Amino acid sequence: MLCRDFREIADSYLSDELLVETNHDVIRHLEACADCRRELAARRELRSKLREGFQHAPDLQMSDEFADRLKAQVRDVALRRSRFSAANRAAYIAIAASLVIAAALGFRAVYQRLHSQNQPYLTSGGNRDEKTDRERNGGRSALASATLTESVIGDHRDCALSHRLA
């Protein structure tokens, strides 16, 4: 690397904006060139003095009134959020409890329906009476099965069309 090349990228080097390979080239050049080391030290010093000047400039300082108002606003927002989060948390817990209760009642209803439909009807000979079973269900199981099958086929057809499947 030439000194001219180093001067062009020295600020990028100080800002850590260069690629790793370029950083290695700069370091190798700095090890061999005392003039560029002095140039880099001068740039570092200039940057630190500028930063310090801006940090301590009276025109750029925050006023005490502004700082007090900002603290009060931040405090108010934090308190408001904590109240709302507690209310939201209680609402979520109530919704979750309602869902758990609804699911439990639904499972219980399904369980009772399954067990009441599976009760064997025995005739005097001890065999299951299939005619009585069909009369009890009123042909509902075949109708329900057909309706469910049509619904499932329709869902798969809609999915295939929306995803352009063969």
Image (tube, rainbow, N blue to C red):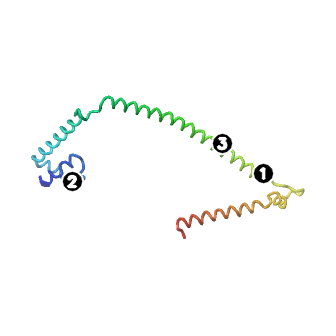
Farthest residue, direction left: 35
**Residue 152 shown left or right of residue 67 in the figure:** right
What is the spatial separation of the Cα atoms under label 3 and label 1, in whole angstroms?
22 Å
- Which residue is the site of mark 3? 101
Going 82% across and 57% down the picture, which residue do you hit? 136
Give the quadrant of the N terminus.
Answer: bottom left
At label 1, which amino acid type do we have?
Ser
- The quarter of the picture where residue 160 lies is bottom right
Against 20, residue 89 (above or below) is above
Residue 13 lies, in percent from the top left, at 20, 48
The tag earlier along the polypeptide, 2 or 1, is: 2
At label 2, which amino acid type do we have?
Thr
At label 3, which amino acid type do we have?
Ile
| In front of the other: 89 or 65 | 65
Circle 1 residues within 10 Å: few <14, some 14–19, many ≥20: few
Against 115, residue 76 (above or below) is above
- Which residue is the site of mark 2? 22
**Residue 76 shown left or right of residue 36 in the figure:** right
Circle 2 residues within 10 Å: few <14, some 14–19, many ≥20: some
Give the quadrant of the C terminus.
Answer: bottom right
- Which residue is the site of mark 1? 116
